[in-house]
């Protein structure tokens, strides 16, 4: 039995009937690598064997009476794996559109708080006899880094699954504490809070003075402050319904842009998102004079905290320079802006900020979140930020689930009142996979934004080629065919499930079949044996 930290519990308090605070992923697998052939039972057996390595999968939430203090996790005495692992099938033809619709439907439903807060859908009926998993876990249990560690524990490095020995001592469920015990435990913990609050107040005052002095220096450009972002159609109250968009680009292409034009991989990802959002808003007749502002989660997990579940995250606001026409100047402005944002994030004490969350009154915080949503306050105020963008580095070698090789991994992050779009990015096997989650009513055409990412990539690849004096490669030429006309326009774009773009680094990697643009040029899927050194050049951020 363990109490949730204030930061972990805050994701419970922020949850409303329309704002679901779970993180998710949609992964595609090739079952031809399964020894002896694929079966749903093999997937369930694998998960059951790995449960000792997946602690949150058996944690159940226990609320404190009257909302006196943060809830507790207990080892669920009624744990039922069949409730959490479910079998599903896509309707014909089982393409990427059907998979997106299914994933959007799954993340549109809240998790049952009377059970451990996760679900996994094993999805069959995909084209090419592939399978997929759509998994969602509540943000109160994991952040991006701890979620990635769970994924690593669930997957293997080879088709033959490793067998995890039984834990010693064996897992034992907890007894559900009585209301009297919960109240007594809460009062004992609350008695220590006044002293902690005094210390937090002193540290916060000192931090505010230091930050003020820093931002007044002539060579410092402070990042955007909350509620300075321009109002757009992205920034409205949300419903409980979701849309899901996907695309992918080559990690080699992203690195080529970084090497030619400067910045980091994360800066290039932000520039791709900025270019896509700029084009999308132009199609809506929106031309914000001020740059869009992204909320970028940042992991503050120390080395000795790796392996611990829960949340260790902070966040920074970054101007996306969407008001700049030239894509190269836009990238340079983003690079400069992220530098200032990182400097300020370092000046702020993440520990001090998270300490204040410990003092939140659960009952008050939850009611405030519901009131904010029901009164549609987000429609009346300037947004705190326009969009959430998160970049999570992943492995550059193949992973397997119950023997099936993973060919694609699309992350899915939560949206918020006043910010109806989340763009989360994860690298895997030399590719960068974009997962876009949007409110169905505010962004019914969220896939157009994903398609515009391809156009933004084409712009930057062309500029990178000009900067290095080299001709664009085959992959860049394929993307250039869609640039200008817009992938999100009337031109048809067909994305294959599990497809990944070919690298444009001149290494000739063009194995397999890939995403086909309107010009008919394909993008290649990497071979299963194409294990490359895992590195994307920047410290990863984590999805919220």
Image (cartoon, rainbow, N blue to C red):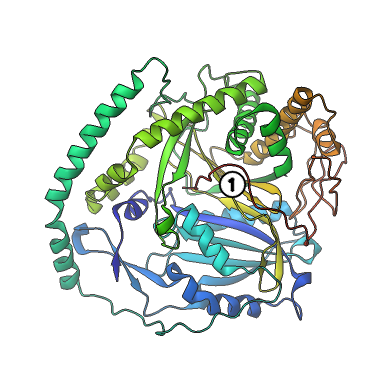
Considering the image in quadrants, where does the N terminus appear? bottom left
Badge 1 marks a residue whose secondary structure is: strand
Is residue 456 at least partly visible in the picture?
A: no
Q: Position of residue 322 (x, y in %)?
A: 57, 23
Residue appearing at x 26%, y 33% in the figure: 207
Question: Looking at the image, which residue is at 46% across and 78% down?
Answer: 80
Residue 32 occupies quadrant: bottom right
Vertical order, 335 against 493 (above or below): above
* Quadrant assignment, res 516: top right
Which quadrant holds residue 472? Answer: top right
Residue closest to the eye, 72 or 334? 334
Which residue is labeled 1 in the image? 243
Q: Position of residue 392 (x, y in %)?
A: 56, 48
> Relative to 210, is 411 on the left or the right?
right
Please give left or right for residue 172 compared with residue 513 in the image: left
Q: Where is residue 183 drawn, in percent x and y?
A: 16, 66
Q: Residues within 10 Å of mark 1 (few under 14, many from 20)?
A: many
The x and y percentages for residue 194 are: 12, 49
In the depicted view, which residue is nearer to us: 518 or 16?
518
Q: Residue at x 14, y 43 (%)?
A: 198
Q: Nearer the viewer, residue 214 or 406?
A: 214
Q: Is 29 situated above or below 347?
A: below
Q: Is residue 93 left or right of residue 139?
A: right
Count all numbered tags in the image, as a single digit: 1
Question: Do we see residue 170 in this rendering?
Answer: yes
Q: Is 530 placed left or right of 156 in the picture?
A: right
């Amino acid at each position: 039995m363990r109490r949730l930290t204030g930061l972990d519990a805050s994701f419970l308090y922020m949850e409303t009937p329309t704002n679901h605070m779970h993180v998710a992923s949609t992964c595609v697998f090739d079952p031809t690598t399964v020894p002896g052939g694929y079966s749903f039972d093999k997937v369930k057996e694998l998960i059951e064997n790995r449960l000792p390595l997946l602690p949150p999968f058996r944690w159940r939430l226990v609320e404190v009476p009257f909302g006196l203090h943060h809830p507790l996790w207990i080892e669920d005495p009624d744990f039922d794996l069949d409730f959490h692992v479910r079998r599903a099938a896509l309707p014909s033809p089982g393409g990427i559109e059907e998979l997106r619709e299914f994933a959007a439907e799954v993340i549109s439903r809240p998790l049952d708080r009377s059970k451990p807060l996760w679900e996994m859908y094993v999805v069959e009926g995909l084209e090419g006899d592939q399978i997929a998993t759509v998994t969602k876990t509540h943000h109160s249990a994991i952040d991006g880094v701890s979620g990635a560690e769970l994924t690593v524990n669930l997957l293997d490095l080879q088709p033959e699954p490793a067998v995890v020995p039984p834990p010693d001592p064996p897992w034992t469920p907890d007894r559900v504490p009585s209301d009297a015990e919960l109240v007594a435990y809460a009062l004992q913990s609350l008695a220590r809070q006044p002293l902690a609050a005094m210390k937090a107040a002193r540290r916060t005052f000192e931090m505010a003075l230091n930050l003020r002095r820093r931002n007044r220096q002539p060579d410092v450009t402070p990042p955007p402050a909350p509620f300075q972002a321009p109002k757009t159609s992205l920034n409205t109250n949300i419903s409980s319904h979701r849309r899901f968009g996907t695309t992918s680009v080559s990690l080699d292409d992203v690195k080529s842009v970084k090497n030619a034009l400067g910045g980091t991989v994360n800066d290039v990802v932000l520039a791709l998102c900025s270019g896509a959002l700029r084009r999308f808003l132009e199609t809506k007749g929106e031309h914000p004079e001020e740059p869009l502002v992204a909320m970028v989660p940042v992991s503050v997990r120390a080395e000795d905290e790796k392996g611990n579940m829960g949340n260790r995250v902070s966040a920074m606001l970054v101007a996306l320079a969407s008001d700049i026409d030239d894509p190269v100047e836009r990238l340079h402005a983003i690079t400069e802006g992220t530098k200032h944002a990182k400097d300020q994030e370092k000046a702020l004490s993440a520990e001090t900020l998270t300490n204040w969350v410990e003092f939140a009154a659960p009952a008050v915080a939850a009611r405030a979140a519901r009131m904010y949503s029901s009164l549609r306050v987000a429609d009346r105020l300037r947004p705190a930020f326009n969009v959430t963008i998160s970049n999570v580095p992943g492995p550059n070698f193949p992973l397997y689930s119950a023997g099936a090789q993973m060919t694609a991994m699309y992350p899915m992050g939560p949206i918020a009142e006043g910010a109806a779009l989340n763009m989360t990015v994860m690298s895997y096997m030399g590719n960068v996979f974009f997962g876009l989650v949007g409110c169905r009513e505010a962004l019914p055409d969220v896939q157009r934004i994903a398609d515009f990412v391809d156009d933004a990539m084409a712009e930057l690849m062309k500029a990178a080629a000009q900067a290095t004096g080299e001709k664009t490669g085959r992959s860049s030429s394929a993307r250039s065919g869609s640039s200008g006309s817009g992938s999100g326009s009337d031109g048809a774009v067909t994305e294959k499930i599990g497809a990944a773009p070919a690298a444009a680094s001149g290494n000739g990697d063009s194995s397999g079949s890939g995403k086909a643009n309107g010009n008919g040029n394909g993008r290649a899927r990497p071979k299963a044996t194409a294990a490359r050194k895992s590195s994307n050049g920047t410290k990863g951020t984590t999805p919220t």
